[in-house]
Amino acid sequence: MVVGFIGLGTMGREMARNLVKAGHAVQAYDVAQVAMQDVVAVGGQAASSIAGAASGAAVVITMLPDTPDVQAVVLGEGGLLHNPPAGRLIVDMSTIAPQAVRAMAATLKAEGIDLVDAPVSGGPQGAKAATLTIMAGGDADAFARARPVLAAMGTTINDVGGSGAGQTVKLCNQLMVGINLQSVCEALALGRASGLDLVQMREVLLGGSAASWMLDRLGPAMIAGDTSAGFRIDLQLKDLRLVQELASALAVPLPGRALVSSQYLEAKAHGEGGNGNQALFKVYDRMTNQSAG
């Protein structure tokens, strides 16, 4: 089908490319013109505007950094509310506030346009391999219409409830990601201070109940002192902010979130916001006066 795709960052670029590879006709748009080149290289088309990406499309997918970015693309001047896809279906795969999703969905619904919130987990590696976990919220009928395009980008695709439910599950995911990554940092810092071989320690831990995605995928980079960007610290901080906004609205205390957020802020204060999530270990380098690698 014809698919509009708006937002071609690290994740969105790979997701759009996988849609092309799956046989969909992708009309890609990003404010950075150069970002569209990778999609065009595999057979996609570059759109000159939001309206151009939506023109004649069965569905438009958005993959953008934060809530205001999605609101601008959906509700702003020249946005999708006024230039809806022919199929009148929008799928937002960004990570944004559930409250904002529900408000946008209501506004769009009044104009006969469906919105599915379908954030993802799996990072840049999952985006490239089309193995993302996708958690979708919205009307069941709209989810069924979106599923064929979602299947080109992920392998675990779940309808988790009504509008905003997908984002709520994603925020719970990001809360666990941050705290789990912190626990890996602390274990590695303790092992290092004890003089252990961290490569061997990681292998042992992966064979027991301490095994986790973070230890498996990011552990080697942490041990090596590799801070190269994948999923960036700035984005993790944004997600933890959204977690706190939701928790505050629901009066749910999250002391673990507060602690790990303070450490991410310490990393950002040291100029590491653009580094990969695993660079949280640099905070422990400073606290223990030791270096990775």
Image: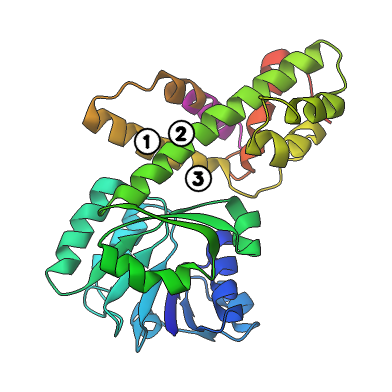
**Residue 292 seen in the current view:** no
Range covered by the magenta-colored residues? 261-271
Residue occupying image coordinates x 60% and y 45%: 274
Whether 186 is drawn above or below 292: the answer is above
Query: Nearest the camera: 157 or 56?
Result: 157
**Number of numbered discs overlaid on the protein picture:** 3
**Which is nearer the N-term, disc 2 or disc 3?**
2
Q: Is residue 267 magenta?
A: yes
Locate residue 133 relative to residue 286 in the image: left or right.
left
Q: Secondary structure at mark 1?
A: helix
Whether 107 is drawn above or below 78: the answer is above
Question: Where is residue 285 drawn, in percent x and y?
Answer: 72, 22
Instruction: Report how far apart the C-alphas of labels 1 and 3 lie in the structure.
Output: 12 Å
Amino acid type at circle 3 is: Leu
Q: Badges 2 and 3: C-beta atoms under 8 Å apart? A: no
Residue lying farthest to the bottom in this orientation: 56
Residue occupying image coordinates x 39% and y 43%: 169
Instruction: Report how far apart the C-alphas of labels 2 and 3 lie in the structure.
Output: 13 Å
Q: Secondary structure at mark 2?
A: helix
Which residue was labeled with disc 1? 243
Q: Quadrant of the N terminus?
A: bottom left
Amino acid type at circle 2 is: Leu
Q: Badges 1 and 2: C-beta atoms under 8 Å apart? A: yes
Query: Nearest the camera: 252 or 100?
Result: 252
Which residue was labeled with disc 2? 175
Locate residue 205 relative to residue 104 in the image: left or right.
right
**Which is nearer the N-term, disc 1 or disc 3?**
3
User: Which disc is residue 235 wearing?
Assistant: 3
State whether the magenta stretch is mostly helix, strand or loop.
helix
**Which is nearer the N-term, disc 1 or disc 2?**
2
Residue occupying image coordinates x 58% and y 51%: 122
Query: Nearest the camera: 100 or 266?
Result: 100
